[in-house]
């Protein structure tokens, strides 16, 4: 099975169209994306392999300002918050690393939901990493650009050297959507074991060699056709489907 990739420009346009012609709210899209992430974790890390999941979230929206751009690809930090709630209900023991919490009302509600479940928020990423079985990298998504700001350089370096599997959401943190891993810096050596692409794969999958899932079961056939995308063969109630990384159409 070969899936077409979605460029940065097309990703932004599709996100806007999902919110307008598609009539989706940001809450809906984030919930579906986070659900997809949680199902990918369950595939990769069944409960009998270890229940401790460390979820590392960026500023809430993949940028440094705490604003909330539209679309399922544009808020990896929020997707991590949603995924953690689902993982708790599955029987996992999530721990959050969320050092730059967004002031956006939507993200504050998601955080309140996690506090209601007594999900702990770690202050020391290294210490939390030493006590987990699996990591969800929801720090930066595909819209990341520019310099990696504190405290995230050390976090990305720790992810690159993590002794446990790492699942990245939409893009390995610090990777460029079109050009893949950065030529220098901590992200240069960061190659996670798994990736879940939301809506559709991005061009960066050309440089990715781990297990690859596509998630986000919300595209209509008409919208997929308009953007030249393939609807993956989701099975039953699954929100994700695993695809071979060598099968992407550039």
Image (cartoon, rainbow, N blue to C red):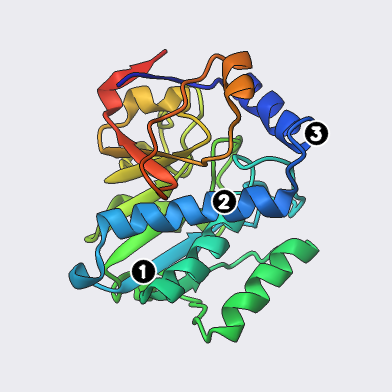
**Which residue in the structure is indicated by mark 2?**
32
Q: Is 176 on the left-hand or right-hand side of 132?
A: right
Question: Between tags 3 and 1, which lies in front?
Answer: 3
**Crowdedness near tag 2: few (<14), some (14–19) or many (≥20) residues, C-alpha within 10 Å:** many
Q: Earlier in the sequence, mark 3 or mark 1?
A: 3
SS at circle 3: loop
**Which residue in the structure is indicated by mark 1?**
53
The N terminus sits in image quarter: top left
**Which residue in the structure is indicated by mark 3?**
20
Q: Is 102 on the left-hand or right-hand side of 95?
A: right
Residue 38 screen position, x and y as percent: 43, 58
Q: Verify CB contact (< 8 Å) between mark 3 and mark 1.
A: no
Q: Is residue 103 something that shows in the picture?
A: no
Residue projecting furthest to the front: 236
Q: Is 143 on the left-hand or right-hand side of 178?
A: right
Query: Going 60% across and 35% down the picture, which residue do you hit?
Result: 145
**Crowdedness near tag 3: few (<14), some (14–19) or many (≥20) residues, C-alpha within 10 Å:** few
Please tell me in which quadrant of the rendered image residue 109 appears: bottom right
Q: Is residue 62 something that shows in the picture?
A: yes
Q: Nearer the viewer, residue 25 or 160?
A: 25
Question: Between tags 2 and 1, which lies in front?
Answer: 2
Distance between mark 3 and mark 2 Cα atoms: 17 Å
Residue 5 screen position, x and y as percent: 47, 21
Residue 159 against residue 74 in the figure, above or below: below
Residue 55 screen position, x and y as percent: 45, 64
Distance between mark 3 and mark 1 Cα atoms: 35 Å
Query: Going 58% across and 16% down the picture, which residue do you hit?
Result: 225
**Crowdedness near tag 1: few (<14), some (14–19) or many (≥20) residues, C-alpha within 10 Å:** many
Q: Earlier in the sequence, mark 3 or mark 2?
A: 3
Residue 42 against residue 19 in the figure, above or below: below
Distance between mark 2 and mark 1 Cα atoms: 19 Å
């Amino acid at each position: 099975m070969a899936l077409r990739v979605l460029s940065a420009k097309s990703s932004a346009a599709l996100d806007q169209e999902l919110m307008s012609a598609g009539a989706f709210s940001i809450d809906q899209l984030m919930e579906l994306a986070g659900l997809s992430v949680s199902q990918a974790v369950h595939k990769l890390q069944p409960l009998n392999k270890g229940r401790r999941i460390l979820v590392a979230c960026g500023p809430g929206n993949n940028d440094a300002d705490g604003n909330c751009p539209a679309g399922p690809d544009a808020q990896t930090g929020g997707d991590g918050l949603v995924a953690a709630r689902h993982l708790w209900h599955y029987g996992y023991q999530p721990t959050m690393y969320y050092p730059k919490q967004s002031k956006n009302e939507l993200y504050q509600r998601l955080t309140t939901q996690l506090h209601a479940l007594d999900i702990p928020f770690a202050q020391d990423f290294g210490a939390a990493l030493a006590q987990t079985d699996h990591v969800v990298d929801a720090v930066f998504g595909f819209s990341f650009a520019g310099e990696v700001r504190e405290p995230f350089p050390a976090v990305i370096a720790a992810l690159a050297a993590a002794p446990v599997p790492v699942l990245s959401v939409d893009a390995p943190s610090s990777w460029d959507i079109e050009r893949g891993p950065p030529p220098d810096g901590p992200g240069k050596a960061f190659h996670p074991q798994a990736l879940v692409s939301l809506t559709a794969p991005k061009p960066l999958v050309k440089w990715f060699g781990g297990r690859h899932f596509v998630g986000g079961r919300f595209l209509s056939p008409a919208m997929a056709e308009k953007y030249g995308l393939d609807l993956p063969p989701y099975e039953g109630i699954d929100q994700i489907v695993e695809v071979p990384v060598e099968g992407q159409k550039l």
